[in-house]
Amino acid sequence: MKAVEAKGFKIPLVGLGTWTLHGRDCARLVEQAIRVGYRHIDTAQMYDNERAVGEGVRASGKRSEVIVTTKIQPQWLAPQELERSVKESLAHLRLDVIDLLLIHWPNPRVPLSETLGAMARMKQAGYVKAIGVSNFTVALLDQANKVTSEPLVCNQVEYHPYLDQDKVIAACRKHGMALVAYSPIARAQAKGDDLLARIGEAHKKSAAQICLRWLIQQGVAVIPRTARIERLEENLNIFDFALSDGEMKEIAGLVRRGGRIVDWSWSPQWD
Ligand SMILES: NC(=O)c1ccc[n+]([C@@H]2O[C@H](COP(=O)([O-])OP(=O)(O)OC[C@H]3O[C@@H](n4cnc5c(N)ncnc54)[C@H](OP(=O)(O)O)[C@@H]3O)[C@@H](O)[C@H]2O)c1
């Protein structure tokens, strides 16, 4: 599996998203994903599926080859809460270590320096291999990189052809961080897209595969979610063709106002 490297940490270009997956179905899907070649599994404390994800990873027999990402809930970003919740995540996952630990959403009520300090301590104590952030704006990326004592390897954000993320991508590059795209097939909207389907016909690929290829061809890692075992391979099978410069530009033209799908209004707000 090809990977994007940031500060010495490698993130596979295609991983599996697990939001909404639970219980035995989740464990079975994670195990099968690893069997067919996935090497990055994305979970979060908020998804309430760390137990099942860990079970699937262990059942695969390939634990040492797989990166497991989990994310700290915004209400647990104060140092003591963070440390408690990370230990709890590890207990749920029943794994030796969390490979990549992210701040799920920023929380303006907790100073970033305190959160990142606690994350650095968890890394130094061996609970975590690498740390990063999610849903960080350009300004927050600048601030975080100024105060962190440990390298931040990625920013996980919503990204697909309908949403312009040029500024965040540029900020990640400036800070040597990888960008990991969540909702990379726009929560299935890409599958019904005429342009993506037309380009797909030329390459004998589905619209979803064209969408994912467009992202990885920019050096962005993706974590598409599927609950269907047959789609695991489809979403992985995007390394045997390339989009032309013209096709890349055409797809970039799908960007639209209000292209964001994930609602931020529930998250802790700045006063
Ligand atoms: N950091 C954050 O704040 C954050 C926020 C949102 C998501 N995430 C992470 O990112 C992951 C992915 O994002 P997402 O779940 O929002 O959306 P997504 O991966 O863009 O879309 C998932 C949807 O697409 C469908 N799908 C998957 N593969 C397909 C294919 N080849 N053809 C047609 N349809 C396909 C799935 O249906 P089927 O199940 O029927 O295949 C599902 O309905 C999440 O699971 C989660 O791990 C992180």
Image (spheres, rainbow, N blue to C red):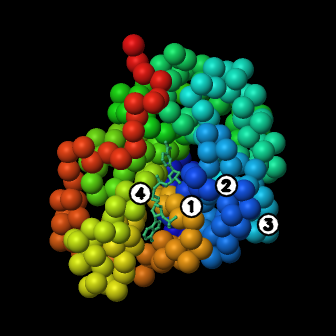
Relative placement, left or right, of 9 versus 106 is right
Work out whether 3 lies above or below 84.
below
The residue that disc 3 covers is 59
Residue at 75% from the left image edge and 28% from the top image edge: 84
Image coords of residue 241 (percent x, y)? 37, 81
Amino acid at pointer 3: Ala
Q: Secondary structure at mark 1?
A: strand
The residue that disc 2 covers is 22
Q: CA distance from mark 1 to mark 2?
A: 14 Å
Image coords of residue 153 (percent x, y)? 53, 44
Quadrant of residue 64 within the rendered picture: bottom right
The reply to whether dot 3 and dot 2 touch (C-beta < 8 Å) is no
Image coords of residue 157 (percent x, y)? 42, 45
Q: Is mark 2 within 8 Å of ligand 1?
A: no
The residue that disc 4 covers is 187
Quadrant of residue 1 within the rendered picture: bottom right
Q: CA distance from mark 1 to mark 4?
A: 14 Å
The reply to whether dot 3 and dot 4 touch (C-beta < 8 Å) is no
Q: Is mark 4 within 8 Å of ligand 1?
A: yes
Q: CA distance from mark 3 to mark 2?
A: 16 Å
Mark 4, residues whose alpha carbon is within 10 Å: few (<14), some, or many (≥20)? some
Q: Earlier in the sequence, mark 1 or mark 4?
A: 1
Q: Secondary structure at mark 3?
A: helix
The residue that disc 1 covers is 16
Q: CA distance from mark 3 to mark 1?
A: 16 Å
